[in-house]
């Protein structure tokens, strides 16, 4: 069973690895749901941890209906990240009608090979999850990250279980959204999933530079806050999964 932690910094990636995660999803701008991280961040995280690093390929915040310019950026980001030693990619594209953009998704997956590809929670915004499952599987992705179309995976447990059964051995279903140590056992037991994704981020606040609280450099009033993964939170989820006989192992020792 795989435990994947969403991170946006070297510090959080190292905490995830020490806590027992098998993989990190690396992105930037978590406040926008995550966008593609810089080459510098990818390189630094790859050097700091020995577990798998999957990179978010998302050129901007907002919806998942991309222009030709957006798509060219995604292609270039995959080409660049492949040179930095990553293990896989996380992406998701929809049409204006709310269906999987199969043509472009297939192109990105083909470019990403031989690395793995996860179709992220753009899936949960699809108009028809059953159709979306078939489309993503046909495109050749390795897994789908989903909350079952609900606000979080606990509310979507029934649907996640249905998707897992429908997917069979064709594609792995990974549950994500609001998963914590307190609810992961119930999630796994009720859905039968073997892949868990969570952020377990704590918000760390800091004072504005020179105390200039009136100055704004972003639209978020909490712009001087940052997200940080707590190693103990990761270990707590890891240990619950291990107690279920999932065999997550502890191959996530950080280097440095």
Image (cartoon, rainbow, N blue to C red):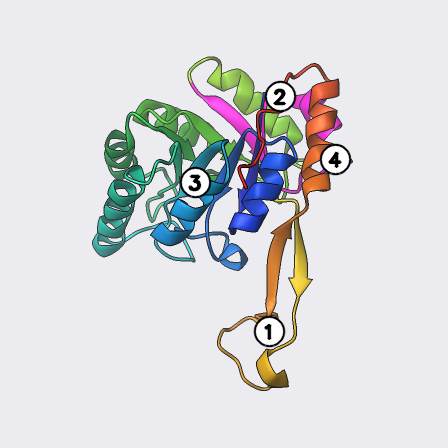
* Vertical placement of residue 111 versus 164, above or below: below
Query: Nearer the viewer's eye, disc 2 or disc 3?
Result: 3
Residue density around tag 3, few if under 14, some if 14–19, many if 20 or more, within 10 Å: many
Left or right, 38 with respect to 67, comes to: right
State the SS at label 3.
Answer: helix
Mark in front: 2 vs 1: 2
Residue placed at 65% from the left, 30% from the top?
157
Q: Mark 1 points at which residue?
A: 221
**Pointers 2 and 1 in contact (C-beta within 8 Å):** no
Assess whether mark 3 and mark 2 are in contact (beta carbons under 8 angstroms): no
Image quadrant holding the C terminus, namely top right
Residue identifier under label 4 = 181
Mark 4–mark 1 CB contact (< 8 Å): no
Q: In this view, does 165 lie to the left or right of 186?
A: left
Q: Nearer the viewer, residue 228 or 58?
A: 228
Give the magenta part as a residue range: 171-198
Near mark 2 (Cα within 10 A), the count class, few <14, some 14-19 or many ≥20, is many
Q: In what element is the residue under mark 4?
A: loop
Height in image: 38 above or below 198? below
Q: Is mark 1 on a helix, strand or loop?
A: loop
């Amino acid at each position: 069973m795989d435990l994947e932690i969403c991170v946006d910094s070297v510090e959080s990636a190292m905490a995830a690895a020490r806590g027992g995660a098998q993989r990190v999803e690396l992105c930037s701008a978590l406040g926008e749901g995550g966008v593609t991280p810089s080459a510098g961040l990818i390189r630094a995280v790859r050097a700091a941890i020995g577990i798998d690093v999957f990179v978010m390929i998302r050129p901007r915040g907002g919806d998942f209906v991309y222009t030709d310019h957006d798509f060219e950026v995604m292609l270039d980001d995959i080409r660049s990240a492949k040179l930095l030693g990553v293990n896989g990619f996380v992406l998701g594209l929809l049409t204006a009608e709310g269906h999987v953009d199969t043509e472009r998704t297939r192109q990105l997956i083909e470019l990403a090979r031989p690395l793995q590809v996860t179709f992220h929670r753009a899936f949960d915004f699809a108009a028809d999850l059953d159709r979306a499952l078939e489309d993503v599987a046909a495109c050749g992705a390795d897994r789908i990250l989903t909350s079952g179309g609900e606000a979080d995976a606990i509310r979507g447990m029934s649907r996640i279980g249905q998707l897992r059964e429908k997917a069979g051995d064709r594609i792995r279903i990974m549950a994500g959204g609001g998963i914590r140590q307190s609810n992961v056992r119930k999630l796994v037991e009720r859905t039968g999933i073997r892949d868990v994704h969570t952020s377990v981020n704590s918000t760390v606040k800091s004072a504005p530079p020179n105390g200039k609280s009136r100055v704004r450099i972003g639209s978020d009033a909490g712009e001087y806050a940052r997200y940080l993964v707590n190693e103990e939170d990761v270990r707590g989820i890891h240990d619950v999964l291990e107690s279920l006989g999932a065999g997550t192992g502890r191959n996530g020792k950080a280097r440095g």
